[in-house]
Image (spheres, rainbow, N blue to C red):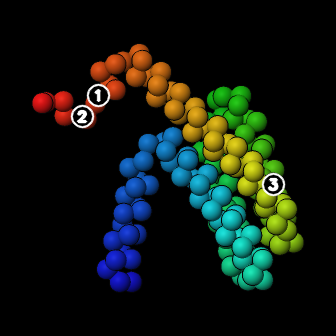
Amino acid sequence: MNVNAQAYDNYKKTTVETAAPGKLLLMLYDGAIRNIDNAKEAIRQKDINMAHNQIIKAEDIVLELTASLNMDYEVSNHLSRLYEYLHYQLVQANLEKDIQKLDEVREFLADLRNTWEEAMKKTAVSSRRDNPSRSNAGLNLRG
């Protein structure tokens, strides 16, 4: 591995290790969506090995999303069932190299991602409203 590739890998590792939980969740959704897009392109190009590998990566992410659920909340039970369905669809898409199944999973993941991002924004706004001093945290206001 060359120095640039190693530096980039270290950067990615540090980014993941230091990400806030909400940001990490967005990164997982983004990764799964990117893998699905790559798999669809590989299917179109008839690169079955690449499609398989990309779908497996998306499956792994969905399994990680499932494992990260806090089952103390009712919504987690619903998400668990949804993730189970999405994982099943990914397995079927991989067996059949079915772009339509990949599109369905991608749409669900994109909706979940966007909903989570919106919730994070609303929480951040609410947090700044409740604690105005935090909105300037890290800023150098000396003039």
Spatial distance from mark 2 to mark 3, Cα to Cα? 43 Å
Q: Quadrant of the N terminus?
A: bottom left
Q: Residue at x 80, y 70 (%)?
A: 94
Tell me the kind of residue under disc 1: Asn
Tell me the kind of residue under disc 2: Leu
Which disc is residue 136 wearing?
1
Which of the 4 image quadrants contains residue 141?
A: top left
Q: Secondary structure at mark 3?
A: helix
Q: Where is mark 3, residue-wise?
A: 104
Can residue 73 be seen here? The reply is: yes
Left or right position of 39 against 30:
right
Q: Look at the picture and state if 93 lies above or below 80.
A: below
Spatial distance from mark 1 to mark 2, Cα to Cα? 6 Å
Q: Secondary structure at mark 1?
A: helix
Q: Residue at x 85, y 62 (%)?
A: 100
Residue toward you, 80 or 105: 105
Which disc is residue 98 wearing?
none
Q: Where is mark 2, residue-wise?
A: 139
